[in-house]
Amino acid sequence: MKIKHKKRMGIDNRRSKIGNGFVIVLLLLLGAFMAFPLYYTVIQSLKPSEELFQFPPRLYVLRPTGQHYTELLQLMSNLWVPFSRYLFNTLFVTFTGTILHVVLAGMAAYPLAKHKFPGRDALFAIILLGLMFVGQVTFLPMFIIVSKLGILNTYWAYICPSVGASLGLFLIKQFIEQLPDALLEAARIDGASEWKTYFSIVVPNIKPAILTVFIFQFVNIWNGLSKEMVYDEQLKVVKVALEQVSASNAYARMGSGMAGSVLLMIPPIIIFILMQRNVVETMTFAGMKE
């Protein structure tokens, strides 16, 4: 019996090693596939013009150069609106929209997760329905709403549409649902109001979810800011300015456009690296039910 047990254990260990090896290879392939666009953009920004337009394109660069980055800085310095203005607009809109979204999503998720009131399930179903539509589908009604509110061509035209995103509310609600009801009841028995309970008990326990939503919303706003709702050059953002510079002579400035794409990637990557540990924990809790 012992011999059979040892043989079975040896077979299980061998299968486990083979399975682990397969999973590791699969994850490496998926990681390489997902990182390829970033790698290709960086490589294209470092290619000289004669390599940039080669066909078929190479996946490596023979003579790397920083010429395109220098050209991009020169083009941006020649704009009649200073580059610092575009940068300020981008940072202001991105951080303001992200912070407002996180605050409002958390405050809306708390009653949906821990209170019972008429229409709660229907309201949450509508929120989930909002996750099915991309920005291109909702752009026209959003433009009409912004126009009717009288905030067209202002910072609020950037900020308001991003505040009501559904994903952040969904993630925070799922995380709050995992908090024990006894913890909240104890706070209420001690005389804490709902505001006190939320800010003193709930918020400290959902920091991973808050930081995860911050990452997602920061990236969405940073990459999603468009020029359709704002036409005043003083209010435009870096992304729009770079698109205008590249589009004026797309063939000659393709390298500068690639360099601009690389620069636009840097802030979201930094934010993700600083807060990445919270993403896994939040995604784990988002799919759990009591």
Image (tube, rainbow, N blue to C red):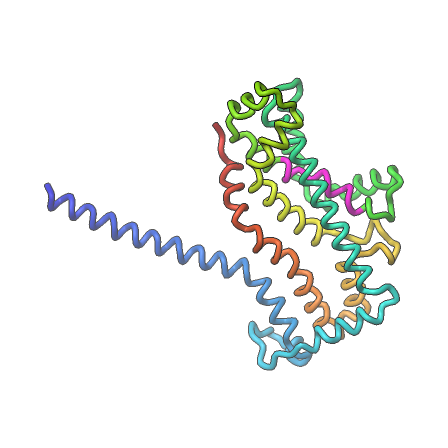
Q: Nearer the viewer, residue 96 or 133?
A: 96
Report the residue at 62% width, 30% height from top.
198
Q: In the picture, residue 51 is in which quadrant?
A: bottom right
Q: Nearer the viewer, residue 167 or 104?
A: 104
Is residue 5 left or right of 30 when viewed as pictured?
A: left
Q: Position of residue 247 (x, y in %)?
A: 79, 66
Report the residue at 59% width, 45% height from top.
212
- Magenta stretch encompasses residue 275: no
How many marks are shown on the rendered structure? 0
Q: Nearer the viewer, residue 230 or 212?
A: 212
- Magenta stretch encompasses residue 163: yes
Magenta span: 158-169
Q: In the picture, residue 90 is in which quadrant?
A: bottom right
Q: Position of residue 96 (x, y in %)?
A: 74, 46
Report the residue at 49% width, 40% height from top.
284
Q: Specify the principal SS of the magenta part.
A: helix
Is residue 29 left or right of 14 when viewed as pictured?
A: right
Q: Position of residue 189 (x, y in %)?
A: 57, 18
Q: In the picture, residue 78 is in which quadrant?
A: bottom right
Report the residue at 62% width, 54% height from top.
271
The quarter of the rendered structure image containing the N terminus is top left
Q: Is residue 179 above or below residue 61?
A: above
Q: Position of residue 233 (x, y in %)?
A: 87, 58
Give the farthest residue toward the front.
Answer: 190
Is residue 189 left or right of 19 when viewed as pictured?
A: right
